[in-house]
Image: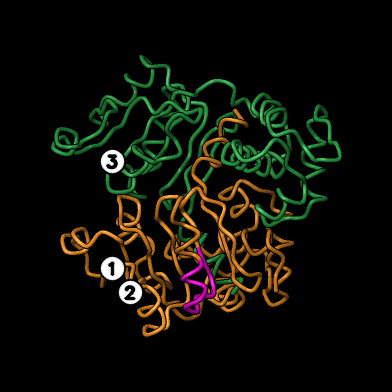
Chain colours: A green, B orange
Amino acid sequence: MLPTNTAERLCKIYGILQMIKKDSGYVSSKELASMMGTTDFTIRKDISALNLVSFGRRGYHIGELSSVLGKALQLSRPYRSCIVGLGRLGSALLDYESFRGDGFDIVAGFDSNINKIERIRTQIAVYPVSELDQVVKNKSIEVGIIAVPHNSAQEVATTLVKSGVKGILNFSPAQIKVPSEVVLYNMDFTSALRFVVSQI
Amino acid sequence: MLPTNTAERLCKIYGILQMIKKDSGYVSSKELASMMGTTDFTIRKDISALNLVSFGRRGYHIGELSSVLGKALQLSRPYRSCIVGLGRLGSALLDYESFRGDGFDIVAGFDSNINKIERIRTQIAVYPVSELDQVVKNKSIEVGIIAVPHNSAQEVATTLVKSGVKGILNFSPAQIKVPSEVVLYNMDFTSALRFVVSQI
């Protein structure tokens, strides 16, 4: 297992490579560093942790680095994911441009409001949240994305974990708890905005 | 200026304190560590960087820690912010539950689609993006939140910076560039989802 900070940066590098893929054959650690707002030393250290990538005069070969990163980060196959909570944020995520065709299969959406489920316009199958447990098991969903209000986030997380989900991306401001074997990542908008302000 | 990692964690601690405020008078570094998924040593080190907080047998006094953090992170006054791009994500952010009354004044929204601006239901003043420069100056907006598609993100960022914004929270998957004196924080959903998968 890669250290958390290294894995976080390698995921960003992988994302950058996907975007610049068509532009050129090679990328230098300096270019990557400038795009990520870090130092080229950090970039080289992170990539050297993979122990598999050659670094020539022209930098890293984009195709090679991308494929090695994909394997190291377990991104070589799509992960079956679902979104719980189809308010504005949840339905924005259902159609988020860079999820599509990017190693993630969003295979289901859930909401507690039956009217919303009937009205929502999306290509993805949507269900009442009462069927969460059953659908996650039937569809072998591995990742749950939580976009419900903070007061129901823990309940949703608990159901997801019980149903067999291995990772959770939490968009609610709630501090949810999961067993240590389940991966949890909090996308906390308010903390992010506070961080911007604290650095001004 | 606090180190980046410390500031990020202190912002999260501040958010937790806002939520548990009513629950009890004191909080221990162990409790904070468990809520944040880190070690109590890290929490104590981060808080000791503030050099101002007493730590008794019962832990930190929530009110005192909250007020010291608010000052250190410059959160003692609301920052005037705007959201550019009012698609599903942008309009979700306009009404995001934990932005309201939480040290951030979202004072304007912008979109390139005039019809959308006329139809959108929100309490916040909305404008065509052609008026971005003028409105940011007139309203003394300090923070810009970018929620446009990736192909227009850089143009929006450049206009925001020219108009005097000091910090940018970028929700688009684009790698945008800003001058070094402007604070930039990327909320990259795809990287976050990749990170979850890489740790499974």
Taking B42 as reference, is B158 left or right? Answer: left
Tell me which corner region of the image, top left, top right, bottom left or bottom right, holds residue B135.
Answer: bottom left
Vertical side of A76 occupied by B45: above or below: below
Taking B12 as reference, is B136 left or right? Answer: left
**Magenta stretch encompasses residue B163:** yes
- Identify the disc placed on residue A86: 3
Residue B85 percent across, percent down from the top left: 35, 59
- In the foreground, B128 or B76: B128
- Identify the disc placed on residue B131: 2
Residue at x 46%, y 70% (from the top left corner): B159
User: Do the residues under discs 2 and 1 have CB atoms within 8 angstroms?
Assistant: yes
Residue B184 percent across, percent down from the top left: 57, 63
Highlighted magenta segment, given as a residue range? B158-168
The residue labelled by disc 1 is B128
Residue at x 77%, y 51% (from the top left corner): A30
Residue type at the position of mark 2: Glu
- In the foreground, B149 or B68: B149
